[in-house]
Image (cartoon, rainbow, N blue to C red):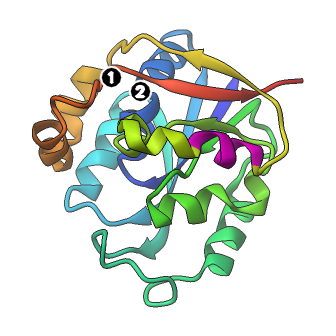
Amino acid sequence: MRVTVVEPHNDDAWLSMGGYLSQLLAAGHKVRVLTVLRNSGNAAGESAGLRLFGVEVVASNFYAPAYPKWREGTYFTADRIHAWLAQALDEQSDEVWCPVGLVHPEHILVADAPALARAGRYLELPAGFVKKNRALLPSRLEKWGAKYTVEHSPPGQKALVIKRVYKSQGWLIRFHHKELDLTEETRFRVAP
């Protein structure tokens, strides 16, 4: 099986779906990650870390400043990003996953790409695990007009990957430690 995961930033795939991805890799499946926006100070290290686990990483050349200084048009436009995604998506993928896009403007921009209309959705960390943001979930899932089944994954190697590879997220672990379970994962698979 071939699985493609679209991540708005170069840390979203493993932070949000690391348990599921580690299960796929352990079973010998091919995992491909499309990184849409580069903004982490450890971008090269994180991509190299994913490659160590056997993940194919394809990154755009779009740069985004650190949130909340984001403004569309300063560094990229929705049209350019959506065109890149349409070109980068692999028609041979058995599964395609992208974020729900709850509150972060860059996540919403990526999630709303027309090429991802039938993709499965993952609840992105940290926004998806902050209780007040969960109220937005039904309206975001209804946007694409699909029915979804809910899936959860055990953490697998996710905690190890976060500790070793995602050093840029140390603030996240310290800041949200009381409200956030890094091992929790929720996905919404498009029902047949």
Magenta highlight on residue 120: no
Q: Of the numbered discs in the image, which one, if any, rests on residue 18?
A: 2
User: Mark 2–mark 1 contact, CB under 8 Å?
Assistant: yes
Relative height, residue 153 to residue 163 (above, below): above
Q: Amino acid at mark 2?
A: Gly
Q: Quadrant of residue 141?
A: top right
Relative height, residue 142 to residue 112 (above, below): above
Q: Residue at x 79, y 38 (%)?
A: 92
Q: Position of residue 186 (x, y in %)?
A: 52, 25
Q: Position of residue 133 (x, y in %)?
A: 44, 45
Is 100 left, or right, of 61 in this rendering?
A: right
- The span picked out in magenta is 137-142
Q: Is residue 87 visible?
A: yes
Badge 2 crowding class, 10 Å Cα cut-off, few under 14, some 14 to 19, many 20 or more, is many
Q: Residue at x 71, y 52 (%)?
A: 89
Element on which disc 2 rests? helix
For this orientation, the residue located farthest to the right is: 192
Mark 1 highlights which residue?
158
